[in-house]
Image: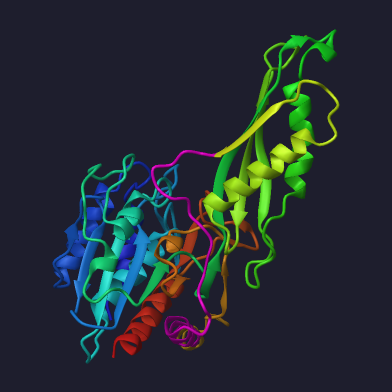
Amino acid sequence: MTDPVVFLERAVQHNSTEAVDGIRELLLGTLEHGGVEPCVDAAGNVRGSRGSGGPHLVFNTHLDTVPPHIPFERDGETIRGRGSCDAKGPLAAMVTAFLDAEWAGEGTLTLAITPDEETLSTGADALVTGEVAPGGPGETGATVDSLSAMEPAPDAYIVGEPTGLDICTAARGRFEGTIAVDGVAAHAASPASGVNAVAAAGRLLAAVEEFDNVGAHPALGEPTLVPTVIDGGEATNQLPSGCEITIDRRSVPPETAEGFEAALTAHLQAAAERGLDDAAEPIVEFSLTPRETPFLEAFATDADAAAVQTLSAAAESVAADAELGERGGIRPFGAATEASYFAPAPTVVFGPGRLADDGGAVAHAEREYVDTRSVRAAAKALRQATEQLLE
């Protein structure tokens, strides 16, 4: 078995916060050395396949990392640095399993690695739609071969993220939008002569807390809706004519971005009109933040799906052999992920490393790290699961 830590050590040394050219070249060279002829499509995705028949399994994760870049360090079995767990650790495990897995049947294993998961997800969007949206690192307006157009079409997806070697079958989505309140400016000494947009926004904050258009999901629980930024007013002695509230929505199935926008708009407009005696009322509008690609929506995969059960058993066995404790549990993932682009096909999130530990945040934090033993265990579990799923 190839040692994924060799790839990981080199990968973390590449600064992938603004451009992914360096790590992309490392990935291409590693695949070519392993006997695979990869390609870079017009969206900047690195793609490669082994096999030509069914069933068809897809490995997906991403090359980019959030800023700032944290230099590579190694201390015994611990690798530190930006991307060590999110998501170059999962990438190293996937590349190793992709090259090492062997199966007797005609199944297909595809590696599809995206360049901009932390920003616009134009790479993942192109993998699904076959079109390159503007704003990302690819050739805007170009077309690519979508994964669903492959023969045979994918049967399941494994998405690499730091899950602590657990199998995550669901995740909340993330939507962002702005509540715009339009009032009428007036002198603060004569408040009745205008409409105070900031005061109206205050009433709307209570309405935001009351919003509930979907029930709890059995795996993910309740959705959340949180106001994160408020901006209004220009002078301390003037009734503000406008105010904006930015909100963060963490959704659960079956809510979609479009359905959320319509439901919250109706709820806020009703709240703005309720209980007001003034002849002039504020105008309230809500809109999602414009994006060239779809928001990361919530997804949920049946825990009984073959990909879930097979990978769970492999991760549990490998972790036990490596004395890593209990791993391979089936649970939700704690963050939004590009896995939502591939659902409703059976999709799971899996990889070494953790979003957070007892000491606080790990992924996206200055202390980001991954344990090399878990990287090797992830590679071995992925290989074993792949060989069983494609046999």
Q: Quadrant of the C terminus?
A: bottom left
In which image quadrant can residue 111 be found?
bottom left
Q: Does the magenta stretch include residue 294?
A: yes
Q: Can residue 164 be seen in this view?
A: no
Residue in front for this viewpoint, 254 or 307: 254
- Side of 102 relative to 320 (left or right): left
| Rendered position, 163 above or below 321 | above
At x 72% / y 50%, what residue is drawn? Answer: 211
In which image quadrant can residue 37 be found?
bottom left
Q: Where is residue 240 in the image (x, y as percent from the top left)?
A: 71, 17
- Side of 209 relative to 374 (left or right): right
At x 53% / y 61%, what residue is drawn? Answer: 298
At x 63% / y 67%, what residue is drawn? Answer: 220
Q: Where is residue 185 in the image (x, y as percent from the top left)?
A: 71, 13
The part of the chain drawn in magenta is 288-316
In which image quadrant can residue 386 be found?
bottom left
